[in-house]
Image (cartoon, rainbow, N blue to C red):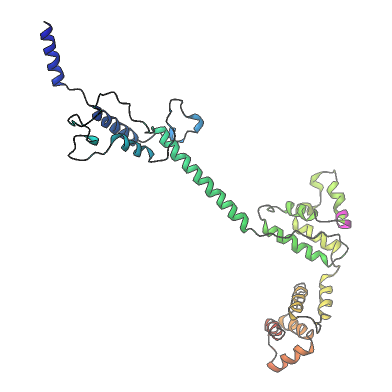
Amino acid sequence: MSRTIQTRSRTARANNPEPSASDTRRAAALSALTSLRRSPDSVSQFQGFSARRASSPAKRRPPGAFVEDLGDDLGDDHPGDDGPGGDGPDDPDDPNPDDGGEDPIEGIPDQEEAGLVIFNNLSIAIDRLACSSCSSESSSRTKVREPDTFDGTDPKKLRTFLVQCELNFQDRPKAFRTDRTKVTFAQSYLKGMALEWFEPDLLGAGDPLNRPIWMTDWEEFVIELQTTFGPHDPVADAEHQLDHLRMKENHRANQYVVDFNRIASQIRGYGDGALRHHFYTGLPDRIKDEISRVGKPRTLNGLRVLTQEIDA
């Protein structure tokens, strides 16, 4: 009876041989690679690192590292050998024959681990790109000088004050999108009697609807400044300055051109011929002599260019 049982057992083992260790490793590798090809869950791949399951003990490795580990465990598979690495069951020189008790393959990340690695690298790249863009923008931004304080004692300084304010508005358009912010900025650079003029309305506790229009309207604020602290008749003052403007012998033509343009921009009703006459009248004799020798230009711009070339 026992002999019959042993015979049947040997026959079953012959018909169903146990898989070798190399076959086990190959099957595990193919199963792992097949599972990685499946599309990861759209939610799990974007989970935060704090939401990782405690059942994921695998250590984070750079992409592609698990392929090298897989190759080390499988060995070199060459056609014609007796199995992976040449250590099949028919190799008589194998000092360690397969016993079927080897450890499973390690180092292959699961789906969640692979998705987190990709998402983490993408986040780092976006952060670096944003920092680079911010540093480039801040380094290329111009530095505009703040306005000089205006106290209202010199009407001629009001125009310069308004020009400096306008430069700051153009440099930071987002910060000065409303007239109220422009008015507040300009008032912060007033002092003396100029600030005292606006003080009652600024500290008034009355109804906001009854406040002056200039508090929320930049053009009205400029008119208030010009009416109170500017020249009483700016056009007449500009015409007087233009009539008496002279270029001195020891002065450069560039300074004369700048002064002439500044005064002429405040005058209305003067044509090109009248302005050209005033410009020529204010030149010194040494430049007039050179102009007479080459011929007097027929336009104001031509006369300015010729004057600068002669004085260069």
Q: Is residue 81 above or below residue 310?
A: above
**Main SS, magenta residues:** helix
Rendering quarter of residue 45: top left
Answer with left or right where residue 213 lies relative to residue 169: right
Q: Quadrant of the N terminus?
A: top left
Rendering quarter of residue 150: bottom right
Residue 155 rendering spot, x and y as whole percentages: 85, 66
Residue 184 rendering spot, x and y as whole percentages: 77, 52
Residue 207 rendering spot, x and y as whole percentages: 82, 43
Which is nearer the eye, 71 or 56?
A: 71
Which is nearer the eye, 120 or 5?
A: 5
Check if residue 15 falls in the magenta segment: no
The magenta-colored residue range is: 192-196
Residue at 40% across / 41% down in the picture? Answer: 63
Residue 71 rendering spot, x and y as whole percentages: 31, 38
Residue at 57% across / 49% down in the picture? Answer: 131
- Residue, far top: 1
Q: Quadrant of the C terminus?
A: bottom right
Answer with left or right where residue 189 lies relative to residue 92: right
